[in-house]
Image (spheres, helix red, strand yellow):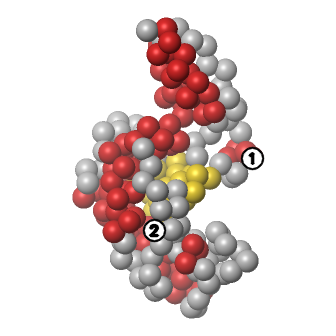
Amino acid sequence: MFEKHILKFALLAPVLIGLHSPSHAESLVVDLADTVPAVEQVKEGLFPEEACEELRKNGFKCMGFKPAVRFSIPNAHFQLGSAELPAELKKQLDVFAQVLSNRPSDSPPIVVTGHADASGDASLNQVLSSERAKAVKTYLTQKGVSPSLLRVEGKGADKLADVNNPFAPANRRVEISRQ
């Protein structure tokens, strides 16, 4: 029994070592690429304070935790000019739906941010990125996530993932994070 708690602590330690710091939060991005994350990875990434609570329940002291991470999903990118969800992205979103579908109503809001590459007009890219975020919200709500838990925003081509190639498919992405 004790070994199980030690193992769990060892697995959670990277999440729990840092202290919550807004200036540090910008650097905490988990790039999922084309991988489907594990439910625990998403849960601990979005709600790291819950891992601290679990440690406390098991008699351990929690010295702090890293802020929630931002999940970037670039390799399951959208087609040029499209807000249609690719099949690869749906597989990834299914895991987020598992984590978020049973969240209490007082949970911290989740932000779905859509992005576009630099092709096209800036105002059209803004609209397109918002449509991508809305498509993700719609998909998640169809999977049982409360619409009131999700906020959407579009960044257009303002926050490129690949700044060296503004037209790269990796820039056509969504990010899921805490508000």
Q: Which label sits in the foreground, 2 or 1?
A: 2
Per the rendering, the mark at residue 154 is none
| Residue positioned 36% across, 49% down in the render | 95
Residue 171 location (% of width, % of height): 58, 74
Q: Secondary structure at mark 1?
A: helix
| Residue positioned 62% across, 84% down in the render | 167
Q: Secondary structure at mark 2?
A: loop
Disc 1 residue type (three-letter): Ser
As rendered, which of 53 and 105 lies closer to the eye?
A: 53
Q: Quadrant of residue 67?
A: top right
Residue denoted by label 2 = 76
**Crowding at mark 1 (Cα within 10 Å: few <14, some 14-19, many 20+):** few
Residue denoted by label 1 = 23
As rendered, which of 9 and 139 lies closer to the eye?
A: 9
From the viewer's perspective, tell me whether residue 156 is left or right of residue 82: right
| Residue positioned 52% across, 20% down in the render | 7
Disc 2 residue type (three-letter): Ala
| Residue positioned 31% across, 62% down in the render | 139
Task: Identify whether 32 is placed above or below 66.
Answer: below
Task: Identify whether 71 is placed above or below 15.
Answer: below
Residue 128 location (% of width, % of height): 47, 80
As rendered, which of 173 and 20 lies closer to the eye?
A: 173
Residue 83 location (% of width, % of height): 40, 77
Mark sitting earlier along the chain (2/1): 1
**Crowding at mark 2 (Cα within 10 Å: few <14, some 14-19, many 20+):** many
CA gap between label 2 and label 1 equals 28 Å
